[in-house]
Image: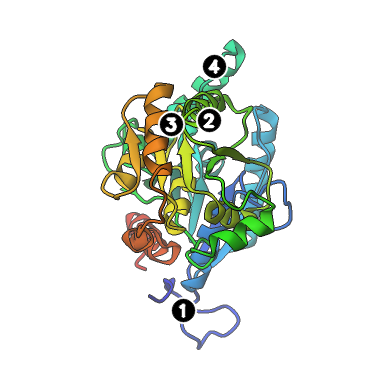
Amino acid sequence: MNGLKTPGVNADNPEASPRPLRILFVTTQWSETDEAKSAPFVGREIESLRAHGLDVDVFTYTGGWSFFAYLRAIRQLHARLRQAPYDVVHARFGQCGLVGRAQRKVPVVITYGGSDVQGVLTASMSMRLKIWTLRSVSWVLSLLADEVIVVSRHLGEKLPRRYYHVIPSGIDFTVFRPIDRQQARIQLALPPDKPLVLFVGNPDNEQKRFSLAERAFERAAASIDAELVVLTGQPSARVPLFMNACDVLLLTSFQEGSPNVVKEALACNLPVVSVNVGDVRERIGAIEGCVLCESSAPEVLADALLTVLKHPRRLASRELIRDLDGTVLAEKVIDVYRRALAKHGRPA
C-alpha cells in the first residue's frame, strides 16, 4: 500500500506529485536519540508508517507529573507546527493527547495503551490521585480528539467515546521468530535440559505481580525440576533469545492493555500460561498448547504450568497471528489518518 499523499504541491518542486502525508508523532515513550526512552513497540509503529511512505517526525518530551513540563511541551509543539506543514498529530498515550490537542489547526489522533485509561495498581494515596488525574484527562481528551485508537477493545469500553478503532501494537516477525532452542540456551548460558519458565517484567513493578508468579512456580516446581527465568533490563534484541530458550511464558499481571510480550511469544511459537487480563483471551484462547486461567490462584497457575511443562512442545501459533504484523496494522492506522483528515475537509 502506498503512503498517503496530501493535496497540493511539493514545495521543492511545484511540478512534482503531491508530497507524502506528514505526521508529527508525539510520545514520552520513544526517542530516536535517547536510549532511556526506548519502548520498542512505539519505534516499530513509527518505522512501519515510514515504510508505507509517510513522512513521520517524532516529538519526544518528558512530562512526568509536572504542570510546567507540560506547558513547556505545549510551547515546543506549537513551535514545531509553525516550522513545518504537518497534516496529522498522532499522540501515543493519553497524556500525550493533552499536548497534541493543545492546538486546533491540525487533526489529532490519540492512541490509548492501558494505564492511561484503566490506571495502575498502587498503594500510595498520592499516586492514586495522580493516576485518577491521568484517567480523567484521558477520558475528556477522547471526546476532543478527531479519532481515537485503543490497543484492545476493553479499553475503548472504558471511554465515553462510542466510536473508536481497535488497533493493537504490531509485531516485527523478522525479529520475533523461532530459532533453535539449544543454541538460544547456549548463548544465554541457561541449563541445556531443564524445563524453563519465563517471566518478563520488572519484579518490583506491583502491576506485574511477580510474587504471584513465584508462588505458582514454586508449587509447580514441587512436581517437576524446573527453573524460573526472569527477563528484565535486557536489550530488546535479546528478548527473542529468551523466548526461544524457554518452554513457557508465565503472565500474572494485575492489568494490561494488550501485552506485547504475549504476542511476541506467540510469534516465537512459545506456549503461554496467563491470567485473564487485557486482550490475552483473544490472543491465546483458541491456540492449542496455551492455557488461559480464569483464576489467579497460585495453585491454578501451577497446574497450568505443569500441563505445559509435562508435555513440552513448540506451538504453531506464529501463522495464526499474522494479522498482528506491524506492516498490516500500519495500514489500519493510515486509514484512521484518512478519517481525521476528512473531518477537516481535507481529502487524502
Q: Is mark 4 on a helix, strand or loop?
A: helix
User: Residue 90's x, y, as percent?
Assistant: 49, 52
Report the quarter where the C terminus lies.
bottom left
The answer, for residue 23, to whether it is visible in the render is: yes
Q: Using residue 321 as the reference point, say whether residue 263 is left or right of it.
A: right
User: Which is closer to the viewer, label 4 or label 1?
Assistant: 4
Mark 1 element type: loop
Numbered mark located on residue 18 in the image: 1
Q: What residue type is labelled 1?
A: Pro
Indicate which disc, 2 or 3, sits on the residue closer to the N terminus.
3
Percent position of residue 141, x then y: 43, 35
Label located before the other in sequence (4 or 2): 4
Alpha carbon distance from label 4 to label 1: 48 Å
Find residue 208 and name its label. Answer: 2
Disc 4/disc 3 C-alpha distance (Å)? 13 Å
Q: Is mark 3 on a helix, strand or loop?
A: helix
For the residues marked 2 and 1, what is the alpha-carbon distance in whole angstroms?
47 Å
Can you name the residue that lies furthest to the bottom here?
A: 15
